[in-house]
Image (spheres, rainbow, N blue to C red):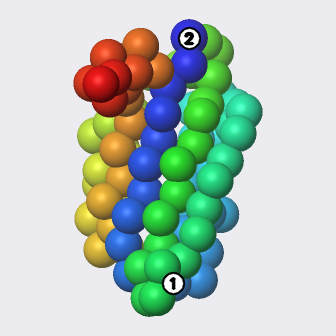
């Protein structure tokens, strides 16, 4: 199963490393990544494979949200099918 991870916040050193490290600790593989800095704001969208993940998507959401809070970032994870349904016009 695939999921979408989004990260938004003020740019700072180590954002990508911190998010990827947390994902790797739970056996989540990054399939694709897009990131940019808009003025002083960092944005990143990742397509990840959660089929080998050792925890539920809901639990990962809590872990990512806490990691984001600690760095003043918004970090979310959502199943790909739900993400696509919500963003279909």
Mark 2 or mark 1: which comes first in sequence? 2
Please tell me how many numbered marks the rendered image carries: 2
Other residues around mark 1 within 10 Å, as few (<14) / some (14–19) / many (≥20): few
Instruction: Find the residue positioned furthest to the bottom.
Output: 40
Across and down, in percent, residue 50 comes to 57, 21
Residue at the image position 51 percent from the left and 84 percent from the top: 12
**Quadrant (top left/top right/bottom left/bottom right) for the N terminus:** top right
Across and down, in percent, residue 68 comes to 35, 61
Using the rendered view, name the quadrant where residue 26 is placed: top right
Q: Is residue 44 positioned above or below 84 on the image?
A: below
Residue at the image position 34 percent from the left and 67 percent from the top: 73
Residue placed under numbered mark 2 in the picture: 1
> In the drawing, does residue 15 fall left or right of residue 8?
right
Real-space CA distance between mark 2 and mark 1, rounded to the nearest whole angstrom? 30 Å
SS class of the residue under badge 1? loop
> In the drawing, does residue 25 fall left or right of residue 71?
right
Q: Nearer the viewer, residue 44 or 73?
A: 44
Q: Is residue 70 visible?
A: no
Residue placed under numbered mark 1 in the picture: 12
**Quadrant (top left/top right/bottom left/bottom right) for the C terminus:** top left
């Amino acid at each position: 199963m695939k999921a979408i991870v989004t990260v938004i916040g003020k740019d700072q050193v180590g954002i990508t490393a911190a998010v990827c490290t947390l994902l790797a600790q739970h056996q989540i593989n990054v399939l694709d990544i897009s990131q940019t800095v808009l003025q002083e704001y960092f944005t990143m969208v990742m397509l990840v494979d959660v089929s080998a993940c050792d925890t539920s998507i809901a639990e990962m959401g809590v872990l990512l949200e806490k990691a984001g809070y600690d760095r003043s970032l918004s970090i979310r994870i959502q199943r790909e099918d739900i993400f696509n349904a919500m963003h279909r016009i």
